């Protein structure tokens, strides 16, 4: 009889323990998930265009005529108007994708991708736009055919699916590649220096929209 009572007490104890364990708050250890930093960043411009670039080691900085004029110590816009007799295209804005520790101290030290945006109210084609303005102001002093023929954008290309034309100016430092994209009422002009950063260039161009 005593053994039966002890057995019943043990069974009851086990049942109570089981219920207590299930009702008691579980020990939920918060496992902090280590989120790796994103490998890419997306630059979104108020003008409506965007592109991706490496999150580590690169940055997007403003660029434009004033910066370029300061570097070259020349007012190319004024000179253009004086030589040609009409003003160059209306500049809207520019950005440069560069190495975070690089200093843009000269045109040849620019980042792998520099993008200048010009107004194109007439929605001119790339050919028409080039015939009027050529590589302003990056290639200076070549005003007419046949002189500027060797920098004419004859290479058919695409930039993220958009029709483009480009050319490589091999005699300039870094052998820059100039690529034009006509989009709506704007002309996008890319100055590309591939060097060791071809992957960065491809990432920017393939994601540009």
Image (cartoon, rainbow, N blue to C red):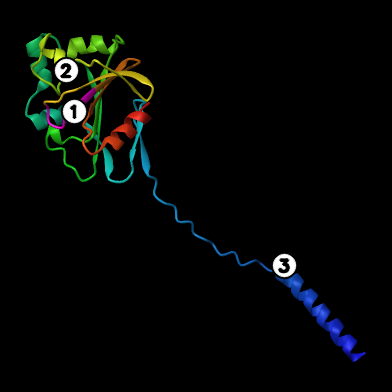
Q: CA distance from mark 3 to mark 2?
A: 78 Å
Horizontal and vertical percent for residue 56? 31, 46
Judged by its main secondary structure, the magenta piece is loop
Crowding at dot 2, Cα within 10 Å, few <14 / some 14-19 / many 20+, comes out as some
Q: Which mark is residue 22?
A: 3
Numbered mark located on residue 176 in the image: 1
- Is 151 or 19 nearer to us in this picture? 151
205 left or right of 29? left
Quadrant showing the C terminus: top left
**Left or right, residue 114 beside residue 137:** right
Closer to the chain start, of discs 3 and 2, is 3
Marks 3, 2: nearer the viewer: 2
Q: Which residue is mark 2?
A: 151
View extreme (bottom): residue: 2
Quadrant assignment, res 184: top left
78 or 144: nearer the viewer: 144
Image mark count: 3
CA–CA distance in space, label 3 to label 1:
70 Å
Which portion, as a residue range, is magenta? 172-178
Name the residue rendered at 81%, 82% in the picture.
10
First-in-chain label (3 vs 1): 3
Name the element at disc 3.
helix
Q: Does residue 29 lie above or below 132 as drawn?
A: below
* Up-down relation of residue 22 to residue 174 (above or below): below
- Classify residue 77 by image quadrant: top left
Q: Secondary structure at mark 1?
A: loop
Disc 2 versus disc 1: distance between alpha carbons?
A: 11 Å
Name the residue: 20% across, 28% down: 64
| SS class, disc 2 | helix
């Amino acid at each position: 009889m005593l053994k039966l009572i002890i057995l019943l007490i043990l069974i009851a104890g086990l049942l109570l323990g089981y219920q207590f364990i299930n009702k008691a708050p579980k020990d939920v250890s918060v496992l902090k998930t280590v989120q790796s930093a994103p490998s890419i960043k997306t630059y979104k411009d108020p003008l409506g265009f965007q592109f991706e670039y490496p999150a580590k080691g690169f940055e997007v900085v403003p660029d434009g005529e004033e910066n370029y004029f300061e570097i070259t110590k020349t007012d190319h816009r004024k000179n253009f108007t004086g030589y040609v007799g009409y003003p160059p295209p209306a500049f809207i804005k520019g950005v440069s994708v560069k190495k975070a520790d690089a200093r843009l101290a000269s045109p040849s030290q620019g980042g792998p991708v520099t993008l200048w945006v010009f107004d194109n109210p007439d929605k001119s084609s790339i050919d028409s736009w080039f015939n009027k303005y050529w590589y302003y102001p990056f290639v200076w002093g070549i005003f007419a055919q046949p002189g500027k023929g060797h920098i004419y954008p004859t290479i058919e290309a695409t930039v993220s699916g958009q029709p483009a034309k480009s050319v490589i100016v091999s005699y300039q430092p870094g052998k820059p590649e100039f690529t034009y994209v006509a989009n709506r009422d704007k002309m996008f002009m890319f100055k590309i220096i591939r060097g060791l950063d071809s992957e960065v260039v491809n990432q920017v161009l393939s994601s540009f929209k």
